[in-house]
Amino acid sequence: MLFSRLFRFPSHDMAIDLGTVNTVVYVRGKGIVLNEPSVVAIETVNGIQRVKAVGRDAKLMMGKTPDSIRTIRPLRDGVIADIEVAEQMIKHFIQKANGGPSRLPRFPEIVLCVPSGSTSVERRAIRDAATNAGASRVWLIEEPMAAAIGAGLPVIDPVGAMVVDIGGGTTEVAVLSLRGLAYSSSVRVGGDKMDDAIAASVRRRHNLVIGETTAERIKHELGSALPPTEEGISMHVRGRHLAEGMPKEVIISQAEVADAIHEAVSQIIGTVRTALESTAPELAADIIDQGIVLTGGGALLSRLDEALSAATGLSVTVAEYPLNCVALGSGRTLEDPDYKGVLTEV
Ligand code: ADP
Ligand code: MG
């Protein structure tokens, strides 16, 4: 009696949101236990490559590594750019979430959420990585479905709901009903494109070269989907001057950041509009009632909800924990048998 309870309870079944920027791990009965950048630092010594750091430690090295170390984001554009490195990363995170390599009470089941642009070959490779890391069964969940469940949308009732998940590499737009995706589309536009556009703009306007970490920080502090109505705020930014080659500091304004990311924002809005135009009338009626819910880190971009609402005429809300929705939704399928139907086994 006691034994069976012991064996049942501390099972380390987990759900993993393998994002292009962040990986979030949910453990059954515990909730989210890990949230780290999807970054791996690889060191090459005498022609042999080995993993130097994974996650937060690897991200700290980005843009600052000596020639012998490279930092890689294996999922960068929503596809699995480097499957071997992706596998190393998944194993590392699974072990970390388990509290170490050898403490598994039994072989766990793992629910994986992979970018919907990934091919079946990539999905199988990811499954193998999870299996090699000790998983007994591996399930997949569609990313927008996970995001919608995590945002608390009514995906089981026959009600149409629209979710827009804005990640680093991709934006996924989906209409859900009856445990399925009535419509979904994915575009390769997200936070990374905005960071690139900010770096390009700073280079053009100020002759200053900045790294992607700095560009992202500018976006977080000044970024806005709509131009500031008044002067807006500004910040000091350091980089290397293009002509002089020396470290230099310039002042960046909110208006120029809004201008730089305008195109990426427009593409996201365009994708949402196309989705609405393609939605069956009955579902469209539901969406008018429910509005649109934004998830993913990009949902935190200032005034994106306002811009989307203006472009669609619908109410737009940001989910409570946008960065965690996918992991929370995937995790929900481990806790609640009603949600098991949204998984596919691979
Ligand atoms: P993924 O699922 O692709 O890993 P996430 O959902 O974790 O992506 O979101 C990461 C993206 O969200 C990054 O591009 C990051 O810069 C962006 N982001 C996070 N916070 C903010 C913010 N406050 N303003 C704008 N973008 C943000
Ligand atoms: Mg994501």
Image: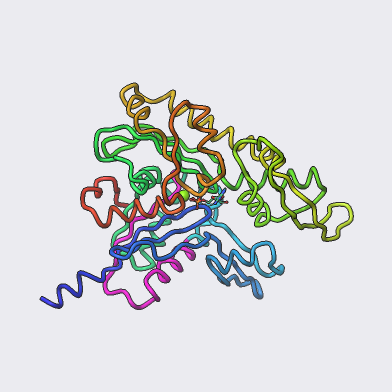
Q: Residue furthest front?
A: 230
In the visual, does 49 lie left or right of 126? right
Q: Is residue 275 magenta?
A: no
Q: Position of residue 57 (x, y in %)?
A: 57, 69
Classify 200 as above or below 263. Answer: below
Most foreground residue, 12 or 285 = 285
Q: How is the image coloured?
A: rainbow
Q: Position of residue 169 (x, y in %)?
A: 54, 47
* Quarter residue 41 falls in: bottom right
Most foreground residue, 298 or 235 = 235
The residue shown at (68%, 67%) is 65
> What are the residue bounds of the magenta stretch?
87-116
The residue shown at (62%, 66%) is 60
Which quadrant, please, contains the N terminus? Answer: bottom left
Q: So how many labels did they put on this image? A: 0
Q: Is residue 99 magenta?
A: yes
The residue shown at (36%, 54%) is 328
* Quarter residue 94 falls in: bottom left
In the visual, does 303 lie left or right of 253? left
Q: Residue furthest left?
A: 1
